[in-house]
Image (cartoon, rainbow, N blue to C red):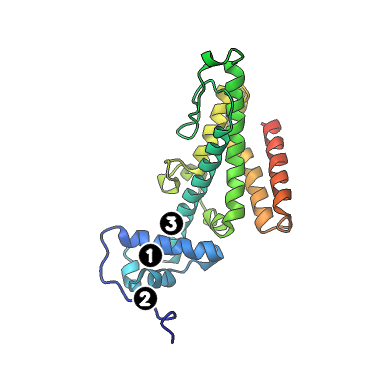
Amino acid sequence: MSADASPPAVRATYRHGDLREALVAAGLQMAEAGGPAAVVLREATRRAGVTPNAAYRHFADRDALLRAVADAAQGLAADRMEQAVAAAARVAGPAADVVAGPTIGLAKDPAADTAFDPAAGLAADARRMLRGVGTGYIAFAREQPGLFRTAFSVPDHLANSADPVKAGALGRTPFQILGAALDAWAAAGILPPERRANAELYAWSAVHGLGMLVIDGPLRGLSADMVTAATSRLLDMVERGL
C-alpha cells in the first residue's frame, strides 16, 4: 500500500463539538463528490481520523449524519443566494430604502438625484432582489450539483425551513431569503397583500424544478448560456405569476 493510500491516523481526542463538525465536514466532502448516496458514516469517521464508536456519540446512524449534512448544504445554498442578491444590489440604481436585510444596503441619497422616485426605486430593488435569489439558487445547483441534491434529500417539514442549522453565514436559510425578497415585493406594492401568503411555495417549486432538470433531468445537456436564458425566462414567469 502506498503512503497516499494509507488511512489517516486515529485521532484520540476532539474538543466538545469539534468531532461533530469534523464529521459533518467530511460528509459535505462526500456529498460534493457523489451526492447523498455517497455520505457514509464509517467513511466520515475515517476522514475525521476517529473510530466509529466515537462518531456514534454524535450520530446514531448514517441517516442522522445525512440529515446534518443536508442541513449544512442548505446553509451553503443560502450563502450562494446571498452572494447573488448582493451582486444584484451592486449594479442597482437609486434605492429608496433598505428592505431586504444585510445584503441590500446600497441606498442612494434621494436629494442627489432630482429624478429619484421612491416608489419606483423600492420596486426596482425588490425585483432585483427576487431575481438574485432565483439566480443564486440555480447557480448553486449548477456549481455544486452534489450538494444541491443532498440539501433536500432528507424528508422534512416546511415548519423546519427556518431552522438555524440550515442557515448560511448571514444567519438566514434559503427559505428565509426567499421570504425576505417576497416581503420586499409586498412592501413595494408589487405583490398584493392577499397574494403574499404562501408565495414562497410557488416561487420555490418553480426554481427548484428547473435546478433538478438541469442537473439530473433532460435539461442537463443544455449549454451554460441556454441555462442562463432559461433561468431568466423562468424568473419572468414567476414574477408574472405572483
Instruction: Name the amino acid type tagged 2.
Output: Pro
Q: Among all residues in the image, which is located at the extreme bottom?
A: 1
Q: Which residue is mark 2?
A: 8
C-alpha gap between disc 1 and disc 3: 12 Å
In this view, the residue in front, 16 or 124, is 124
Which residue is at a point 34% across and 72% down the rendered structure image?
A: 49
Q: Is the residue 20 above or below the residue 133 in the image?
A: below
- Distance of mark 2 from mark 3, alpha carbons? 23 Å
Q: Secondary structure at mark 3?
A: helix
Q: Quadrant of residue 92?
A: top right
Contact flag, marks 1 and 3 (Cβ < 8 Å): no
Q: Kindly identify which residue carries mark 1.
A: 60
- Find disc 3 in the rendering and name its residue: 68
Q: CA distance from mark 1 to mark 2?
A: 23 Å
- The answer to whether residue 198 is left or right of residue 64 is right
**Element type at mark 2:** loop
The reply to whether residue 199 is in sight is: no
Dot 1 amino acid type: Ala
Q: Quadrant of residue 114?
A: top right
